[in-house]
Image (cartoon, helix red, strand yellow):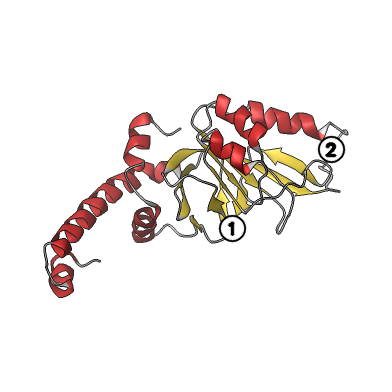
Amino acid sequence: MVTSEQREKLTNFHSALLNDVTDEMGIKDNVIPCTRLESLWSREPTVGTAHPAQRVEIGYEKEGDDDEDEGSEFFDYLEATDPGDFIVMAAPKDTEVGLWGELLSSIVQENGAEGALIDGPTRDSRLIEEHEFPVWAEGHSAIESFGRVAFQEYGVPVEVHDVTINPGDVVFADYESIVVIDPDDLEHVIDEAEDELETENKVRSDIRDGDSVYEVWDRYGTL
């Protein structure tokens, strides 16, 4: 779980900075660009602990399934949301149904969720914004998901935009990208990001003071 101190530090960063840091650390395939999935409204960083679930096409039958009501398992997932969680909903590719909505947002928001990453469209987007619940999704759709897309399971690794997200991973999202960080790497990432941010601020200051690009590059080795 992300501590309050770690959360405060992370919200001082931006996804491009974290991408640079994790690249330098040799961490790959951990950034989801906001080219397909985008923030519905928020431009501020949101940080939470991944609470992943998998949606699948209708017709999927889980091994050992005793015809348990699909809804009850989905409700279990919503109720299992803990304070500080970041909802992660993986789904079939190119689905056009609304996988998320305002009432679901209200439920997990009341349980303390920080935000949601939905691998598909969402409904009730205006109402979600009114509640100020940060959601990243692929556009909008009024089409009901029940009866069209099934709930498979939760608390397991899922894949969104070719990035694997495990339960407990740290999710950082802003208006440019979503960055996924292994909790074992978090302190190192924060330390490196603080150093990188300090350098970035010096570069910006020197440029605005009139230094040439050559001077800045020779001084810091970065732009």
Could you tell whether 138 is left or right of 11 in the image?
Answer: right
Nearer to us in this view, 27 or 97: 97
Type of amino acid at the residue the image marks with label 2: Gly
Image point 16% across, 62% down: which residue? 208
In the rendered image, residue 177, in percent from the top left (x then y), is placed at 47, 54
Image point 30% across, 50% down: which residue? 193
Above or below: residue 194 compared with residue 102: below
Type of amino acid at the residue the image marks with label 1: His
Mark 1 vs 2, N-terminal side? 2
Above or below: residue 158 compared with residue 221: above
Nearer to us in this view, 192 or 132: 132
Please tell me how crowded label 2 is: few (under 14), some (14-19), or many (20+) other residues with Cα within 10 Å. few
Quadrant location of the C terminus in the rendered image? bottom left
> Is mark 1 in CB contact (under 8 Å) with mark 2?
no
In the rendered image, residue 78, in percent from the top left (x then y), is placed at 65, 30
Could you tell whether 157 is left or right of 184 in the image?
Answer: right
In the rendered image, residue 83, in percent from the top left (x then y), is placed at 51, 27
Give the labeled residue for mark 2: 64
Calculate the distance from the C-alpha at mark 1 to the C-alpha at mark 2.
29 Å
Please tell me how crowded label 1 is: few (under 14), some (14-19), or many (20+) other residues with Cα within 10 Å. some
Image point 82% across, 42% down: which residue? 63
Local secondary structure at mark 1 = loop
Residue 146: name its quadrant: top right
Nearer to us in this view, 1 or 5: 5
Q: Residue furthest bottom?
A: 214
Give the labeled residue for mark 1: 161
Question: On residue 195, which mark appears?
Answer: none
